[in-house]
Amino acid sequence: MKVFTFDFVPYGKDLTGRLKYPVGRENYEPEVAAKTYENHVEQFQLMEEVGFDGVCLNEHHGSPYSLDNSPNVFLAYVAANTKRMRLAMAGNL
């Protein structure tokens, strides 16, 4: 059996009360986004260590629930920072 995780990569800051769609620049902090991506890569590395087989990401634009507007680029970064994780994309346009 293979075990994958599905991750939306949600924005790393609580935007409760400001959740309009799409999220505008006034609610976006590049430092928070960078830390969010780094935290998720660290989680994927830990998942790899404990035996997960892969990770699946999907594509969303302007959503606080997902920073993944380009899963191709983020998965390339994940590939460069993991050893054996299988990578999958869902809804890639």
Image (cartoon, rainbow, N blue to C red):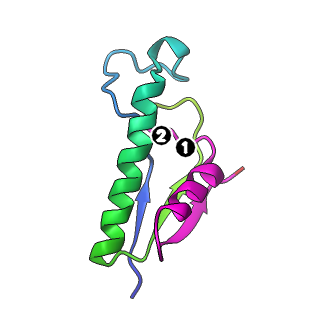
| 50 lies left or right of 5 | left
Query: Is residue 10 something one can see in this rendering?
Result: no
Query: Based on the displayed image, in which of its 4 quarters is residue 65 positioned?
Result: top left
Is 67 located above or below residue 73 in the figure? Answer: above
Read off the magenta span. 65-92
Image spot of residue 24 (x, y percent): 54, 16
Q: Which amino acid does label 2 sit on?
A: Ser
Q: Please tell me which residue is depicted at 41% across the width and 21% down the height of the picture.
A: 19
Is residue 37 something one can see in this rendering?
yes
The residue beneath circle 2 is 66
Q: Do the residues labelled 1 and 2 touch (CB within 8 Å)?
A: yes
Q: Is mark 1 on a helix, strand or loop?
A: loop
Q: Which residue lies furthest to the right in this view?
A: 93
The residue sitting at 41% across, 34% down in the picture is 11
- In percent of width and height, residue 88 lies at 57, 66
- Mark 1: amino acid: Asp
Q: Is 80 a magenta residue?
A: yes
Q: Position of residue 2 (x, y in %)?
A: 41, 83
